[in-house]
Image: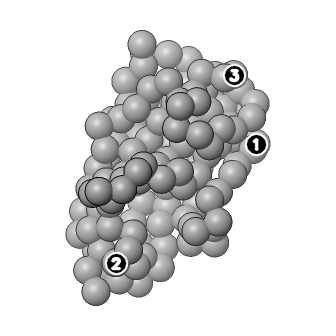
Amino acid sequence: QMQLVESGGGLVQAGGSLRLSCVASGRTFNGCAMGWFRRVPGKEREFLAAISGSGDSIYYEDSVKGRFTISRDNAKNTVYLQMNSLKPEDTAVYYCAAATIGSYGTVSLEHEYDYWGQGTQLTVSS
């Protein structure tokens, strides 16, 4: 089993920045690809970014490329999502997820992830 706990959400003005954190426990962290997703009420969960267990491979959804940055600190069992130039349409619940695929490679499909956090709310005001 693996537990994931997100933090860092909140209320921010449009154009602002925020960094989300996700702390993992229970499994070998560097053996998991990590991803960030978000869900807007009434819509499906949307993939945002993924990073391999080693941190060498990163993949972004086109809609956030250039604004969001995923990173990880394996010594701290933590994955981050730095979000810049935030827009009201970024308002959502943000989730981190872990895929137990080893140290290399990333995955972007929801069903490929094995563990999920409880989510953290981000609200961007206009």
Sequence-first tag of 1 and 3: 1
Residue contact between numbered discs 2 and 1, judged by CB atoms under 8 Å: no
Label 3: few (<14), some (14–19) or many (≥20) C-alpha neighbours in 10 Å: some
Q: How many marks?
A: 3
Q: Nearer the viewer, residue 46 or 30?
A: 46
* x then y, percent, for residue 52: 68, 37
Dot 2 crowding, Cα within 10 Å, few <14, some 14–19, many 20+: some
Disc 1 target residue? 56
User: Where does label 2 land, which residue?
Assistant: 88
Residue 75 x, y percent position in the rendering: 55, 31
Q: Quadrant of residue 41?
A: bottom left
Q: CA distance from mark 1 to mark 3?
A: 12 Å
Q: Which mark is residue 102?
A: 3
Residue at the spot 35% in from the left edge and 35% down from the top edge: 117
Residue 74 in view of the camera: no
Q: Hey, what amino acid is under mark 3? A: Gly
Name the residue rendered at 42%, 13% in the picture. 1
Q: Nearer the viewer, residue 114 or 45?
A: 45
Per the image, label 1 sits on a secondary structure element best described as: loop
Which type of secondary structure does the marked residue at label 3 adopt?
loop
Amino acid at pointer 2:
Pro
Up-down relation of residue 34 to residue 122 (above or below): above
Residue 86 position (above or below residue 25) = below
Foreground mark, 1 or 3? 3
In the figure, residue 23 lies in which quadrant? top left
| First of labels 3, 2 by sequence position | 2
